[in-house]
Amino acid sequence: MAKDESFDITTGADLQEVDNAVNQSKREISTRFDFKNVLADIEYDRQKATIAIHTADEYKLEAIWQVLTQRFIARNVPVKNLQHGNVEKAAAGTVRQTTTLTQGIETEIGKKIVKFIKDQKYKKVQAQVQGDAVRVSSPSRDELQQVMQAVKGEDYGIELKFGNYR
């Protein structure tokens, strides 16, 4: 029997790079003129993979997100994996927003990916959800590369990574 080739579809960010981007953003915001004597607090919780911003108003909140987004892009952190929470009113007229980083493919999205691959009717391609990843296997490397291209063309609301190719 021929040996099956396989690859994994995953998602996530290097949390150290997120930490570095947040620290760079804090330094930049502390030196900007439009943030002088203004509340601009960014907290990063590595265990929960969340970023909480507390600032004076929604205009400042948007400015902080622009700085953070620039730093994330420069450090190859997938901005598509940020799930912004609602803007909440806080004490003294300030605003707060918490954003979560998606670190694994949720089961629901994994099932959509598997269904999409099966709907393409590849001859011997098998796809299955394994935890927070999707494993795709086939005896043909060419078919696997076709699957990669097809999945890259779809939008699942998160940035997909293709790895563990064997």
Image (cartoon, grey):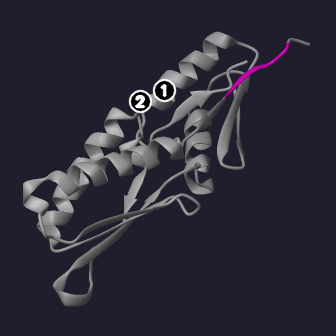
Q: Horizontal and vertical percent for residue 32?
A: 13, 53
What's the amino acid at mark 2?
Gly
Q: Residues within 10 Å of mark 1 (few under 14, many from 20)?
A: few
Q: Nearer the viewer, residue 57 or 115?
A: 57
Q: How many marks?
A: 2
| Residue depicted at 65% across the width and 42% down the height | 133
Q: Quadrant of residue 74?
A: top left
Pick out the residue farthest to the right.
1
Report how far apart the C-alphas of labels 1 and 2 lie in the structure.
5 Å
Q: Nearer the viewer, residue 94 or 150?
A: 94
Drawn side of residue 128 relative to residue 87, left or right: right
Q: Nearer the viewer, residue 87 or 127?
A: 87
Q: Quadrant of residue 164?
A: top right
Drawn side of residue 37 relative to residue 2, left or right: left
| Residue depicted at 73% across the width and 18% down the height | 166
Q: Residues within 10 Å of mark 2 (few under 14, many from 20)?
A: few
Magenta-highlighted stretch: main secondary structure? strand
Q: Horizontal and vertical percent for residue 40?
A: 24, 67
Q: Horizontal and vertical percent for residue 22?
A: 37, 51
Q: Which residue is mark 2?
A: 153
Q: Say whether residue 109 is visible.
A: yes
| Image quarter in which the N terminus is found | top right
Q: Which residue is mark 1?
A: 150
What's the amino acid at mark 1?
Ala
Q: Quadrant of residue 36?
A: bottom left
Drawn side of residue 62 relative to residue 12, left or right: left
Which mark is drawn over residue 120?
none
Whether residue 166 is situated above or below residue 39 in the rendered picture: above
SS for callout 1: helix
Which contiguous range is marked in magenta? 3-7
Q: Horizontal and vertical percent for residue 62?
A: 18, 60
